[in-house]
Image (cartoon, rainbow, N blue to C red):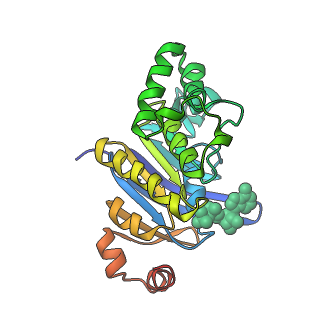
Amino acid sequence: MPSPIIHIDNIIKTYGPLTVLDGLSMSVMPGEKLALIGPSGSGKTTILRILMTLEKINGGHIEIDGEQLYHMQKAGGLVAADERHLQKMREKIGMVFQHFNLFPHKCVRDNITLAPMLTKGIARAAAEARAMELLDMVGMADKAKSMPAQLSGGQKQRVAIARALALSPKIMLFDEVTSALDPELVEEVLNVMRKLAAETDMTMLLVTHEMGFAHDFADRILFFDKGRIVEEGKPDDIFRNPRQERTQTFLRKVI
Ligand code: ADP
């Protein structure tokens, strides 16, 4: 039995007086495709941001790929992670955001080569060759020299996916990646994600309002409400036969 690639143990997250996550625990197995669903404000995005080290936690532990994320093992025991440790851990994870977050003054190809060249010291020629492979995979090779402002939302998001893949992460996080898109552009982004899921063994966590996609894409669905996992299970069980009242009410509203 393999160990989880992500193990979240009793984490607490507060924003001022607001407790968003109050003792959340969950595990994700290597290669698993997980969809986090639930009402707005239930803490789904916060979990992804914590895994990406964009938010600090107020308590608990997270282990990623066998190593503590926010702590380091020292002779005297566990101590808080320093920036070097966080940077190393971040390279295991790629994240795609709702609002793309491309560098506006860099062309598509340079958006992708920047991190590998800066953080991994990869030579420009090798980084560019890899960028072109990734752009080809997301169907954007012909736009390598375009600037982000010249692209549609769907195209920007496909570039953002290629950029997140450039550091060869073991884990990909997708935070409502189609929510800011015009409806006719959603499918081209979902298609890229389907392809990724089919062709790689990456672990993927998805926060989404696209219930049809979550059903088809995920091995397991977690339904969140108020920072807690209310119900989890296989897509067919959650969508066709939810056991909890709160899950039933939510699904009645969104499907
Ligand atoms: P979801 O992704 O399920 O919609 P979020 O994780 O975005 O939920 O938010 C959970 C709660 O945390 C919400 O009440 C939200 O208002 C609050 N929150 C998120 N980010 C911040 C922040 N930077 N400062 C204060 N409150 C925040």
Does residue 161 appear in this view?
yes
Instruction: Describe residue 90's horizontal placement relative to residue 103 as left or right.
Output: left
| Above or below: residue 126 compared with residue 176 | above
Q: In the image, 195: left or right of 106?
A: left
* Residue 105 locus on image (x, y percent): 72, 32
Q: Identify the residue at image location x=52%, y=48%.
A: 61
Query: Residue pushed farthest right?
Result: 16
Which residue of the protein is positioned furthest toward the left in this rendering?
1
Number of marks in picture: 0
Query: Residue 101: image x %, image y %?
Result: 65, 44
> Residue 42 vs residue 31: left or right?
right
Ligand 1 placement by image quarter: bottom right
Does 155 sit above or below residue 16?
A: above
Q: In the drawing, does residue 131 fall left or right of residue 100?
A: left
Residue 106, image x and y in percent? 67, 30
| Residue 21 seen by the camera | no
Residue at the spot 51% in from the left edge and 62% down from the top edge: 184
Query: In the rendered image, which quarter contains the C terminus?
Result: bottom left
The residue lying at 39 percent from left, 53 percent from top is 191
Where's residue 77, x and y in %? Answer: 53, 34
Foreground pick, 84 / 233: 233
Q: Quadrant of residue 107?
A: top right
Residue at the location (50% across, 52% down)? 174
Query: Which residue is at the front of the view, 180 or 184?
Result: 184
- Please determine whether, in this image, residue 176 is positioned above or below residue 42: above
